Image (cartoon, grey):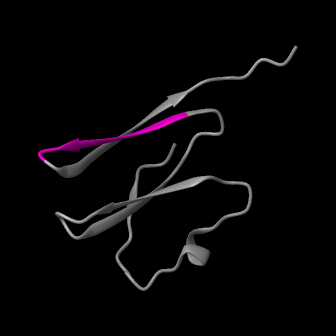
Amino acid sequence: MNQPTEIKDFATTIDQNLERGKVRVIVIDGNEGTAHVTDAPEHGKTIIQTAKGHFARVDHEIGFKIKK
């Protein structure tokens, strides 16, 4: 998993963040006036954590699917 990347250019569009075959998460923090983008795991959960109302951390809970 990659570290969240700050989106510095607010004119960035959704199309510019689309990457075929990937699920991405965009977090918009209105308190700090920032936005970040990160990849989501192929199988698992992405947990956005805040501290005192501000975006603080991204946790990934990754699992592996076993096909039978």
Identify which residue, 1 or 56, lies in the foreground: 56
Point out residue 14 in the picture as x, y percentages from the top left corner: 55, 74
The answer to whether 1 appears left or right of 59 in the picture is: right
Does residue 4 lie above or below 58 as drawn? below
**Residue 59 x %, y %:** 40, 36
Q: Could you say where residue 51 lies in the image, as x and y percent from the top left? A: 16, 43
Q: Which residues are magenta?
A: 45-52
The residue under the point 42% across, 86% down is 11
Residue 9 image-quadrant placement: bottom left
Residue 29 coordinates in the image, percent (x, y)? 27, 61
Res 58 → quadrant: top left
Does the magenta segment cover residue 51? yes
Give me the residue at 48% from left, 48% from top: 2
Q: Which secondary structure is most common in the magenta stretch?
A: strand
Determine whether 48 is above or below 32 in the image.
Answer: above
Q: Who's the residue at 23% across and 66% down the image?
A: 30
